[in-house]
Every structure is written in C-alpha cells, then in structure tokens.
Amino acid sequence: MKKISIGEKVKQERGEEKQSNIMPDNQGQLSQIESGKIKNPKKHTLMEIVKGLNDIGNPITFEELIEGTTWEESKGDDIATEVALSPSLLDMRLTDDGVLTISHKSYPLYNQDGEMNKYCPETGEKLIYECESCGRKVENAEQKFCMGCGEEYFESIDIPKVVKEEIDFPLNYIQEGDSFGGIDHLSKFLMAYKEGTQKLMKEENRKKPTIRERQTLQVVEFVLNYFKKKFINEENQRDSKVSTDESIKTELFRQAAIRITEKMDTDEFSLDKLLNFTQDLGKTDDLTELVEQWDSSSLNDENKSRDGNPENVSDKKSVVEQNDAINNKKEKKGDKNV
Ligand SMILES: [Zn+2]
C-alpha cells in the first residue's frame, strides 16, 4: 500500500469537522500540516491533534494516526529536547574539589500525552520555556541565555558569602572532621536567614518568599547537606576503623588463650613464660612470632634470652611441628585416662 503524507491522513481523520475544533489554539499550524507546508510535524504536535480528534469523537490513537504515512520521528525534534525551566528551583552539584555548579530545575516541555507543562509542580510558578524577546524555545536544562538573541532568561543567582567561604576553605575537603566547622557556620546562617525571611514576609505582607530568597535558602541548604553527608561519612569510616582494630585485638586474645591452654598441658609451661608471653601480647599483633619465641625458649637453655638471636632461630622447630607435638602429648594423656 502506498504511503500518504501525514497531512493527508490528518485531513481524512478530521472529515467534515472544522480545523478550529481540532486545534483551537493553533488552527494555522493544523492548516499548514494538512497542506503539506509542514511536512514532518513534531510528535507533540501530532499528539495535540490526536487529542483534538478524540475530543470531536474520533477515538484515534497516535499509532493509528501515523500508520500508513510517511511521517518519521526525527531525532532533533524529539519532545525531550524541549525543556521548561523553573524560575526559582535549582539543580546543584558540588564536586570534591569545591566547584559548585547551579542550573535551574528543568522539566520536559510536554508530557507523554503531548500536553504542555506550564507550571512548576513544586512552586506553582510559570515555567520558562521560551525567550521573552524572540520567542525561541529553551533547548537544554543548562541554558542560561537564549541561543536566538542572547537574552538572559533569569537574574543571576546570588551565592551567600558564608557559602562561598565554606566552599573555598580547602581543609573542608582534605582533613577529616573539618566539615564539622562548615556545618556549624552554615546551619547558624540558615537558621538566621529563615527567621529573617519570615519576618520580612510578615512585614511586607507576602505569602511566599521571593525568587531570590528561595534560591538563597536552596543554595545554603544544599551546601549544608553536602557537608553533613561528608561529615557522617567521615565518622562512619572512623567507627569502622576502630571496630576493625578492636576485632583484630579480640581475635588475637582468643587465639592467645587457646595457645596458653595448650601450653599449660605440657612441660613447656612455666609462670615466667606465661608472664613474658602476656606482656608481649600487649605490644604486638603477631601471635605466631610470640608462640615461636615461647617454643624456641623451651627448646633451648632456659637461661637464654627470648629475643630470637640467630642461634635460637636456627634450631627452633616450626610452629606446625610444635603443635603436632602438643597434640600427640594430649592424645597420649587422653589414652591414659580411658
Ligand atoms: Zn531570544
């Protein structure tokens, strides 16, 4: 079957109905699509047409409308490339080297049904989606100026001095625990600023904070939360380090207790050795070395030093062999008891 243009298809589906009943806000556009002046309208425009057709009692879907037509969704025209920006809500990023980037919070200009998103869902403000001077659409979320005429969309954002100081302070990024100072300064400032704003709103008989006030609050809260997270992270790391140290010690003493019990069953045991062993235990975390010292001192003359001088090292048995010997002795003892 030969494909027809989208304009022809729309005209067919419209039938006898007036163009203005399908697209009351943009009859001209519909006329241009039907006449073929606009050959490949954007998807959201077709969605609006579908909605209009549904409204006049034609239950057509978007898929049905484009079926059998030459219409193609071109990448550049994807509705996701058109955005609407919130005048006062901000998106912020703060990197670990202290670079703060701020852009206005963005929404897609159209929802899945092709309906326009006109107001900020969080503040109720009118979203910015086109240039006030030349009408060109906003194309990406980071955009601050119109790419058609250079007009600035928003007033520049004011970053409070206290925030700048905390971000610029290098110790906040390199030294553990130093983010606490930042938290302290910023939360005090935030509290005072909130109080001040409330007072001002009362005096000026306003119900909502100004755009500038909203933005200052957001910037301070964001940077404060950044340092809070960083601080909590640092504390958690410190805690886990402590618990690791403690678990190593606990395990060491447990192992040492096993070794001592083993030695107590043999003739290698003496109170002196036990004292030396426990004293050294506090200074080291190498249990094997301590056991070797104990063992080598038992193999040699009792008067020789325990400090592992070359003579001792050369003729001492390995710990494994020693353990085997201990086990054998235990077994023998056990046999006797039976
Ligand atoms: Zn412009």
Image (cartoon, grey):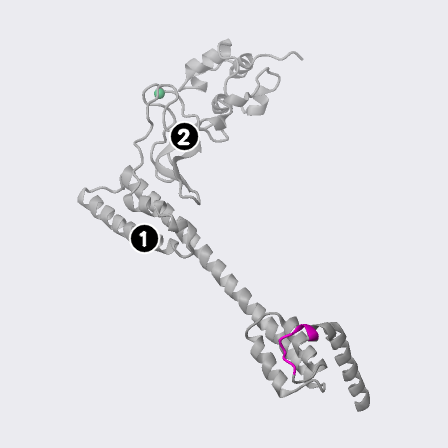
Give the secondary structure at mark 2. Answer: strand
Residue 30 counted in the magenta span: no
Quadrant position of the N terminus in the picture: top right
Give the secondary structure at mark 1. Answer: helix
Residue at point 47%, 31% (across, down): 111
Residue at point 51%, 10% (across, down): 36
State the mark number for residue 84: 2
Which is the main secondary structure of the residues drawn in magenta? loop
Outermost residue on the left side: it is: 203
Outermost residue on the bottom side: it is: 337
Circle 1 residue: 187
Task: Find ligand 1 in the image and state its quadrant.
Answer: top left
The mark nearer the N terminus, 2 or 1, is: 2
Residue 262 at what x, y percent from top left? 69, 81
Between 158 and 320, the one nearer to me in the picture:
320
- Mark 2 or mark 1, which is nearer to you? 1
Inspect the image, locate mark 1, and give the three-letter code of the amino acid beneath it: Ser
Quadrant position of the C terminus in the picture: bottom right
Q: Residues within 10 Å of mark 2 (few under 14, many from 20)?
A: many
Residue 320's image quarter? bottom right
Which residues are drawn in magenta? 304-311
Residue 234 at what x, y percent from top left? 45, 56
